[in-house]
Image (tube, rainbow, N blue to C red):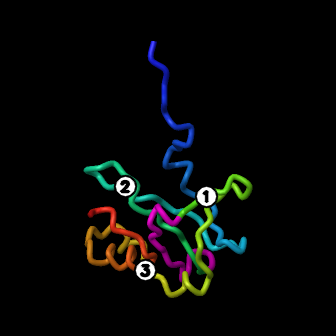
Amino acid sequence: MKTSTLSTAAIPAKRVNGTEVYNSSGEHLGEIEDIMIDKPSGEVVYAIMSFGGFLGMGEKFHPLPWQVLHYDTSKDGYVVDLSKEQLKKAPAYSRDELSDNDTLWRGKVFDYYDQPPYWG
């Protein structure tokens, strides 16, 4: 009989949504609003993190390449190596712009975080 080698680190996308995001200094930065998945490969491309605003007003959405997020079990959240100032300068979009499939703006996101683009 074959034994399963599936990772226990798999998690449903709906459980990622709402997960808090902190920086390396422990400051709360925002929370994961959603994740974007590449249809052909099935890979998680980036997480959309909400940042700033009050009661939904002035809130910006930051696509974070999945590779920059590190899950910290002690915080029950993700940690990124970014200050609030770096995040304020990072590419940010309105909710409507996030569904854009333009690889040009995706390239800006991956360049900002110094990550190789997932599309090659």
The front one of 109 and 111 is 111
Secondary structure under tag 1 reads loop
Where residue 112 is drawn, which disc sits there? 3
Q: Is residue 18 magenta?
A: no
- What residue is disc 2 on? 37
Q: Residue 24 location in percent, x, y?
A: 67, 72
Q: What residue type is labelled 2?
A: Ile
Q: In which quarter of the image is residue 88?
A: bottom right
Query: Considering the numbered disc 3 on the image, is that residue within a helix, a strand or a loop?
Result: helix
Which residue is at 44% across, 17% downward? 2
Secondary structure of the residue carrying tag 2 is strand
Instruction: Report the Cα–Cα distance between label 2 and label 3.
Output: 20 Å
Of residues 37 and 3, which is closer to you in this image? 3
Which residue range is magenta in the image? 54-68
Image quadrant where one finds the N terminus: top left
Q: Percent x, y for residue 108? A: 35, 79
Residue at horizontal 25 percent and vertical 50 percent from the top: 40
User: What residue is disc 1 on?
Assistant: 19
Label 1 to label 2: alpha-carbon separation? 17 Å
Residue 77 is labelled as: none
